[in-house]
Amino acid sequence: MRNFINFVIRSWFFILFILLFGVSLLLLFSNNNYHKAAYINSANNVSGKVLEAESEVTDYFALKKANALLAEENARLRSQSRSAYEIANKKFFEKDDTIHLLKYNYTAAKVINNSTDRRNNYITLNKGSLHGIKPQMAVISPNGIVGVVKDVSQNYSTVLSLLHKAVRVSAKLQKTDNFGSLAWDGTNPDYAYLRDIAIYVKLKQGDTIVTTSFSDIFPEGIMVGTVDRLEEKSNDAFHLIRVKLSTNFSSLTHVYVISDFTRAERDTLEEKTIKAVEHDANGN
Amino acid sequence: MGIEIIKNIFRFFLLLALQILVLNKIQLSVYLNPFLYVLFILSLPIETPRGLVLVLAFITGLIMDMFGDTLGMHTTACLFVGLLRPGMIKLISPREGVDYFKPSLQHLGLPKYLVYAGVLVFVHHFVLFFIEYFRFAELIHMFIKIFASSAFTLILILISQQFFSRSKSNS
């Protein structure tokens, strides 16, 4: 006992280190746990305010580009809107269509913090739970996918960028519907890699890649990027495709957060199925 | 002593602001992430109790993590710097008997300061990027990043030390 006390007194420095090290490991693991929200992040009141004030200043430099991007998107949406169409067949046309159900709602948000040079990049948005943002919602830019909401505070939210080790997106070729899994390799923020598309599928440069309906985060058909080149990989049944991402992550200013109205229903159903299967497995 | 404390508090805020508002925003390359804020832990006065250094390093890392959403990463990396700092200081102490000197470029000279800052910056970056990557397949990328970013941080540290010492001698 005496020896032990002597040891503690002599090496209190090391014990303090172990103690603090334990705390930081705890923080490290809690951050990687997606079901548990972290509170020490850029979405809290102090850091959110500082980052927002900073982006108020620096945003002016990106204003021109952001305006052009949004104007282009407006033009694209206008040409899709009802006023751009003419009724071709005067005999039969739908007047008030009730077949279509509203499934997605888009909330506009501004990026107040962003990085592209880390292995795991995060984005901070200036909208939070007060604006209806919840964890696991999809985030897209006018050009394509951006990421997934991680933590939410009242006025801010943090987003896992597509440029993050943990983010994998189910993506497909728009032409042929062959799907695979897209992830960033941590080197160039302009490109990501698409795997698991069978080698017999014919591809060419410039083919469009969009999200699939299997993703429980992104709606189907959101632009991801275009085929840039096929990486040489021998002895394999699958392509490794380098995809040029359509979103320019280094000049991200305005994004949309998508809330899915059917999300809760889908989640509870899938949970029920998984539980039933587990129950069966245990029963037998 | 009082002036020394105020100086260090000032350095703390200046370096963190510089890191968070400027250096974190400059996206040079995936391999070049300078972390100049480590200079705060490096330049704490020599007589600072080791325990206090450890606690200050912990707090510094925690603030960095808060702004970068990297919970635990900078905290752990800074803790290792705090752990190894006393040993490094013993290593670079001029000689027996001289117990007061400042851990700065001006007081230590380039070779000694380079060893002191180089080792601690390397340890910090090694721990940080090891946690960030934590994947066997990307080991090469990790090491490129550790060496390139350490060198970059070290250059920034030397430049800022030069700048501070010059402004001090002018006044």
Image (cartoon, coloured by chain):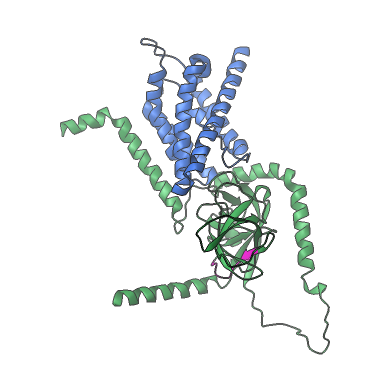
Chain colours: A green, B blue
Task: Please determine whether, in this image, residue B65 is positioned above or below residue B36.
Answer: below
Task: Please determine whether, in this image, residue A34 is positioned above or below residue A269.
Answer: above
A190 left or right of A44 in image: right
Q: Residue at x 54, y 27 (%)?
A: B154
Q: Is residue B171 visible?
A: no
Residue A204 spot, x, y in % from top left:
67, 62
Q: Residue at x 51, y 42 (%)?
A: B141
A69 left or right of A148 in image: right
The quadrant of the rendering that contains the C terminus of chain A is: bottom left
Quadrant hosting residue B157: top right
Q: Residue furthest bottom?
A: A91
Closer to the camera, B14 or B96? B96
Main SS type for the magenta part? loop
The quadrant of the rendering that contains the N terminus of chain A is: top left
Q: Which contiguous range is marked in magenta?
A: A209-216
Closer to the camera, B12 or B83? B83
Residue B24 spot, x, y in % from top left:
59, 39
Residue B41 spot, x, y in % from top left:
47, 28
Quadrant hosting residue A104: bottom right
Report if residue B8 lies within the magenta region: no
Residue A12 spot, x, y in % from top left:
29, 31
A255 left or right of A119 in image: right
